[in-house]
Image (cartoon, rainbow, N blue to C red):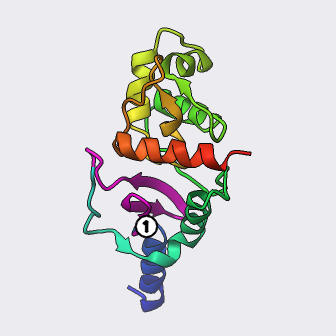
Amino acid sequence: MDPVESNRSHVFMEEFMKKYCYYTAPFGEVLLVEENGSIEQIVFPKSPKNKHPDPDWKLEKSAFKKVTGQLDEYFEGKRKIFSITINLIGTEFQKMVWKELAKIPYGSTICYGELANRIGNPKASRAVGAANGKNPIPIIIPCHRVIGKDGRLVGFGGGIPVKKHLLQLENRSRG
């Protein structure tokens, strides 16, 4: 093989390799995963789906400057809307739910039934809850803004204390 051609394929493979880093949030380190410039996962430290980087992934903090900067602003109460490229990996139903989640305004909450209504399927509260629980990009896709119909904080992959922290942060910073 031509050495120039070999080098090109290595550069191509490097571009499409998943990259990761850890971000220190107020409640612990979260794992950030991206591929080709798009965030694909944010994993909470105490998540039941706590994931460790795949051996094929590359640790590269520089690939996350934009997202970590925006997360810093969010946790400082200065950012209400994220403007980063994401890549949603899931079923069509899950993606529909996640896109609707992204429309919930900063500092607001809705219940699972309301979310089911918003996607045009009022009887799908449980399916909506399951999709919400599989949200691969929490905080940016604000699944923490969905609460039980009685107002209780329920069902959050990062744990109820983290959900409470995020909602309190947004309530303090609203305005």
Q: Is residue 38 left or right of residue 1?
A: right
Residue at 51 percent across and 22 percent down: it is 111
Decide: is 156 above or below 110.
Answer: below
> Which residue reaches farthest right?
175
Which residue is most to the top? 123
Label 1 element class:
strand
Is residue 10 visible in this depiction of the protein? yes
Q: Main secondary structure of the magenta part?
A: strand
Residue 34 within the segment the image draws in magenta = yes
Image vertical order of residue 171 relative to residue 147, above or below? below
Q: Residue at x 55, y 29 (%)?
A: 96
Residue at position x 43%, y 42% in the image: 163
At label 1, which amino acid type do we have?
Tyr
Q: Position of residue 13 (x, y in %)?
A: 43, 72
Asked if residue 9 lies in the magenta stretch, the reply is no
Q: Position of residue 159 (x, y in %)?
A: 33, 42
Quarter of the picture holding the N terminus:
bottom left
Check the image and report above or below for 154 versus 139: above
Mark 1 highlights which residue?
23
Q: Is residue 116 above or below residue 144?
A: above
Characterize the local packing of mark 1: few (<14), some (14-19) or many (20 or more) Cα atoms within 10 angstroms.
Answer: some
Please state the horizontal and vertical placement of residue 8, each as a whole percent of the image. Answer: 49, 81
Quadrant in which the C terminus is drawn: top right
Residue 67, quarter of picture: bottom right
Range of residues picked out in magenta: 21-49
Residue with the most extreme front position: 172
Residue 17 appears anywhere in the view: no
Which residue is pictured at 56% across the width and 49% down the height?
A: 169
Which residue occupies the foreground of this view, 56 or 140?
A: 140
Front position in the image: 23 or 20: 23
Q: How many marks?
A: 1
